[in-house]
Image (spheres, grey):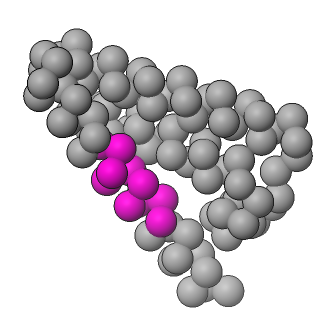
Amino acid sequence: MMMAGFVVALGGMFCFAASQKKQALLIFGTSPVHGWRRLAIIGGTVLLGLSAWLGVSVYGFGVGLVTFFAWACFAAWTVALTASWQRSKK
């Protein structure tokens, strides 16, 4: 369950990165279209909400929230490292 929550949070963070012009250019190589940006923001919100629900439903409220924030922070760190790695390749 620990890996599933992290993967869902990572998908949400990648959706948020895809919704921003600079990060999308660094990670994916293309700039997002306006309709895709809105869809990526909604998708990122849904995925992070799903990750929070997953953490709370499995571990309880207190530990579940702490686990969710750990997943979200580690996912954001992974996206940031991916963006800097892609920048160094160019």
**From what the image shows, is residue 74 above or below residue 7?**
below
**From what the image shows, is residue 32 above or below residue 8?**
below
Give coordinates of residue 18: x percent, y percent: 68, 50
Q: How many marks?
A: 0
**From what the image shows, is residue 10 above or below residue 1?**
below
- Point 33% across, 51% down: residue: 73
Residue 1 seen: no
Q: Nearer the viewer, residue 56 or 24?
A: 56
Q: Nearer the viewer, residue 29 or 50?
A: 50
- Quarter where residue 37 is shown: top right
Query: In the rendered structure, which segment of residues is drawn in magenta?
Result: 71-80
Quarter of the C terminus within the rendering: bottom right
Q: Nearer the viewer, residue 5 or 35?
A: 35
- Point 20% across, 35% down: residue: 67
- Point 28% across, 40% down: residue: 69
72 inside magenta stretch = yes
Q: Is residue 90 left or right of residue 7?
A: right
Give coordinates of residue 81: x percent, y percent: 44, 70
Residue 25 seen: yes
Quarter of the N terminus within the rendering: top left
Q: Is residue 80 left or right of residue 31?
A: left
Q: Is residue 47 left or right of residue 54?
A: right
- Quarter where residue 62 is shown: top left
Residue at the far front: name it.
62
Instruction: Give the main secondary structure, helix, strand or loop, of the magenta stretch.
Output: helix
Give coordinates of residue 7: x percent, y percent: 38, 38
